[in-house]
Amino acid sequence: MHEAFQRLLDVRRDERMPVLLSGAFFFCILTALMVLRPARDALGLAHGIETVRWLFIGTALVTLAANPVFGWLVSRLRRLAFVTTTYVFFAASLGGFYVLLVFAPAAVGVASGQVFYVWYSVANLFVTMLFWALMADCFSLEQARRLFALIAVGGTLGAIFGPWLASMLARPLGTPALLLVSIGFLLLATALAWALARTRAWHGHAAGDHGDGHARIGGSAWQGFKAVFRSPYLAGIAGYVVLMTVMSTFLYFTRLHLVATLGDDTDLRASVFARIDLATQTATLLLQALIAGRLMRRWGVHVVLALLPVTALLGFVGLALVGSLAALVAFEATFRAIQRALTRPARETLYTVVSREDKYKSKAFIDTFVYRGGDVVGAQLEGGLARLGLGLGALASVTLPLALAWAALGLWLGRRQQQLAARGHTAARDSSPAQHGSTP
């Protein structure tokens, strides 16, 4: 039974502890975030869908401002130090919200709710980005194809556990207590990062590691931004993320429109959001546990990256034909499950063939500002269609060319990754032509 279980998971003996710690690490992160997410969505919708579009713009601007600060931390501090600093900062800022709720409840209003919405959106991006950057730094491309989907199971379990925990604790302890729960899980995630540092995986197999996992990365605070525009490979990843977030934002606002028709009851809306999240996470867990790793190994990263665009295209066409809340739940559960169980691990393997500096700096820029920039584009485009009085049919027609371009880009990125891995290229070679005397 032990051998059969090991073959099913495809984890080698020396990988067991790093994978277990990584899964627990991701579990804590997603639990910390998902405990608070239903409240975030309900607060965002409380003052109308148009307000949410402006909050997307605010989030994009904040992530742009935060990127050079994060780049400076990466350049100046050792890896454990900037990991700890980032997580402790977000935990401390949650403490500030807790103090406001408990000691100055009269000050809580529209502005503070919007600030919390933006803060949550920024924190969500940075803490998950940093986790996956660490994974790309600790594991090789071959390991990433086998293990990333399995590690992601820990996050899915946290995403299921978080809303359940919130539903159990919100009434007896009150909403402010949920912030303390989130702080506790963020700090526990930090402790698990330190535990992971003691395993062999930390000293890693990644390109450009050279066996020194604790060395300072150095470089400029803006290096990640510059590298994305110099490297076709990194620019391709950025383009894939933009198209993904535009389509995801279309789905998000479609969800808001349909849920808004249920009435103005914030508690009812939060309950519906929570049920959608639960269905999504359950489907994600099944895909991750049974299919994702084997699919990536058998079909390749390029095919897995193309699956989500095809799903989006078919889903929006189906939603335009049916247009019901039940159809939305089915489509969103399928889309989010494939996005988290298949596309996210596959997309994170793309960073295993780049340099350590690009793993943290360029990835931070792509997964925060570029990601939120796609949100803004999607929100404004969807808003423009809504203001023109166009419905789901028009939205489905817009998704067709976007989905085709998105799928083609996913196929190219997977092939390019194989080329870089085969040639032993690193991001320094791919994103710094002047340094190597040639253009990629």
Image: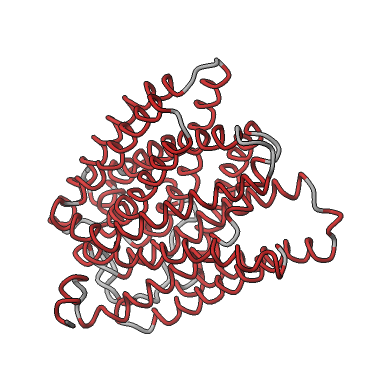
Is residue 290 shown above or below 215? above
- In this view, the residue in front, 32 or 321, is 321
Q: Which residue of the protein is positioned furthest toward the top in this rendering?
A: 388
Residue occupying image coordinates x 25% and y 78%: 15
Is residue 16 shown above or below 330? below
Q: Quadrant of residue 395?
A: top left
Would residue 3 be seen by someone viewing this image from the given angle? Answer: yes
Percent x, y for residue 149?
29, 62
Q: Quadrant of the C terminus?
A: top left
Q: Give the left or right position of residue 95, taking residue 359 as reference.
A: right
Percent x, y for residue 250?
46, 33
Percent x, y for residue 10?
18, 71
Q: Give the left or right position of residue 277, taking residue 265 as reference.
A: left
Q: How many marks?
A: 0
Is residue 9 shown above or below 283? below
Residue occupying image coordinates x 40% and y 27%: 322
Q: Quadrant of the N terminus?
A: bottom left
Would residue 75 be seen by someone viewing this image from the given angle? Answer: no
Residue occupying image coordinates x 23% and y 34%: 408
Q: Quadrant of residue 349?
A: bottom left
Scheme by which the image is coloured? secondary structure
- In this view, the residue in front, 355 or 178, is 178
Q: Quadrant of residue 104?
A: bottom right
Is residue 250 shown above or below 61? above
Percent x, y for residue 209?
29, 69
- In this view, the residue in front, 216 or 177, is 177
